[in-house]
């Protein structure tokens, strides 16, 4: 008998917990249910998924081509798998401010699948924010102002800061930089979503510097409104799968010196429109 996953909303605006599913052995019906749930809820959470790195890659590959991170060497033999790790020797943790992954790329990721195999006894939650909700909550006047604008997203400033902190020599490498619409239309749902983030977006194009700074400052603060958010409490072998086109996330490093460790695969997206 086929088991259809059970989907439970986390909040009315974002997030759902998915039960009765083995992500290491997903049939076509299960795949379809998860794809539809991701489009409906923006981020999905799964518990007790003791799957191998190969299975995690195979899962991601059902949704699209896996991509190599522009500033992470990946695992030995698995360049598309990023280790997300912090322990007592860490000077930083990945994703500690609001962002969508690698938005500096000309074709930013469609989504990411993160599995945690080691979690602290308490802490290490991840916050997710709906960029549909963030857009829809703005006034019509603000929407009209933002709708035609584009913004520059640069990887260099953030990735060089990371490399400096961890003492990694980037050999003077160039990082992606791209111009994207400030409000994008989701290619599957057709809904409009705010698409600027404080990790990568450096300026709005075609307006004076002061106006760009003021607008971005407002938008970065707007994204922090808790009514757009849900918060995931990780357990061992839980997975979060987020749609990077309509959400942002923020990992909380409140568990030092405990260990939090897992693997992320990232799926290629399309040019935002
Ligand atoms: C990230 O992919 O930004 C890290 C998320 C997390 O560690 O929860």
Image: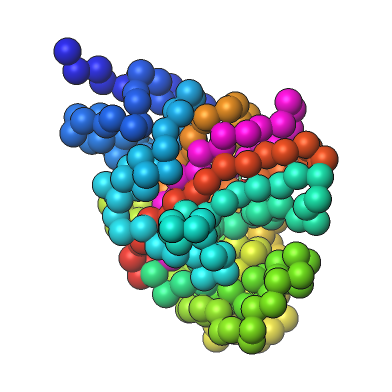
Question: Residue 88's quadrant in the figure?
Answer: top right
| Residue at x 40%, y 62% (from the top left corner) | 67
Residue sitting nearer the eye, 149 or 263? 263
Answer whether residue 9 is visible to the viewer in this image. Answer: no
At x 37%, y 44%, the residue is: 54
Residue 194, position as x, y percentages in the image: 50, 58
**Residue 21 location (% of width, % of height):** 34, 23
Q: How many callouts does the rendering have?
A: 0
Tell me the quarter of the image containing the C terminus. Answer: bottom left
Residue that lies at the very extreme toward the front in this rendered image: 77
Q: Which residues are magenta?
A: 108-133
Along the line of sight, which residue is nearer the eye, 117 or 19?
Answer: 117
Residue 123, quarter of the rendered image:
top right
Residue 131 screen position, x and y as percent: 51, 51
Q: Is residue 273 left or right of residue 125?
A: left
Residue at the spot 21% in from the left edge and 30% down from the top edge: 27
Relative to 228, say whether 103 is above or below: below
Q: Which colour assignment does the render follow?
A: rainbow
Q: Picture coordinates of residue 26 (x, y %)?
A: 27, 31
Q: Does any portion of residue 108 appear in the rendered image?
A: yes
Q: Is residue 163 rendered magenta in the image?
A: no
Along the line of sight, the residue nearer the viewer: 120 or 88: 88
Q: Residue at x 60, y 30 (%)?
A: 234
Q: Is residue 112 magenta?
A: yes
Horizontal arrangement in the rendering, residue 257 relative to residue 139 (left or right): right
Foreground residue, 54 or 1? Answer: 54
């Amino acid at each position: 008998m086929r088991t259809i996953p059970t989907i439970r909303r986390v909040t009315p605006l974002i997030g759902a917990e998915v039960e009765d599913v083995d992500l290491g052995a997903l049939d076509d019906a299960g795949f379809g249910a998860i794809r539809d749930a991701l489009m409906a809820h923006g981020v999905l959470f799964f518990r007790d998924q003791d799957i191998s790195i190969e299975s995690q890659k195979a899962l991601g590959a059902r949704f699209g081509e896996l991509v190599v991170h522009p500033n992470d060497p990946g695992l030995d033999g698995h360049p598309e798998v990023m280790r997300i790790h912090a322990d007592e020797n860490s000077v930083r943790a990945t994703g500690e401010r609001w962002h969508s992954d690698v938005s500096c790329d000309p074709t930013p990721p469609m989504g990411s699948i993160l599995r945690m195999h080691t979690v602290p006894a308490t802490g290490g939650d991840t916050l997710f924010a709906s960029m549909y909700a963030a857009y829809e909550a703005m006034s019509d006047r603000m929407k009209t102002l933002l709708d035609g604008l584009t913004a520059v997203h640069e990887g260099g400033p953030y990735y060089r800061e990371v490399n400096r902190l961890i003492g990694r020599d980037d050999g003077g490498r160039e990082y992606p930089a791209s111009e994207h619409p400030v409000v994008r239309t989701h290619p599957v749902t057709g809904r409009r979503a705010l698409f600027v983030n404080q990790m990568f977006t450096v300026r709005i194009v075609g307006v004076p510097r002061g106006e760009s700074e003021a607008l971005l400052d407002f938008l970065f603060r707007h994204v922090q409104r808790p009514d757009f958010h849900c918060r995931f409490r990780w357990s061992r072998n839980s997975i979060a799968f987020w749609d990077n086109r309509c959400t942002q996330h923020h990992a909380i490093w409140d568990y030092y010196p405990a260990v939090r460790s897992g693997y992320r695969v990232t799926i290629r997206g399309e040019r935002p429109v």
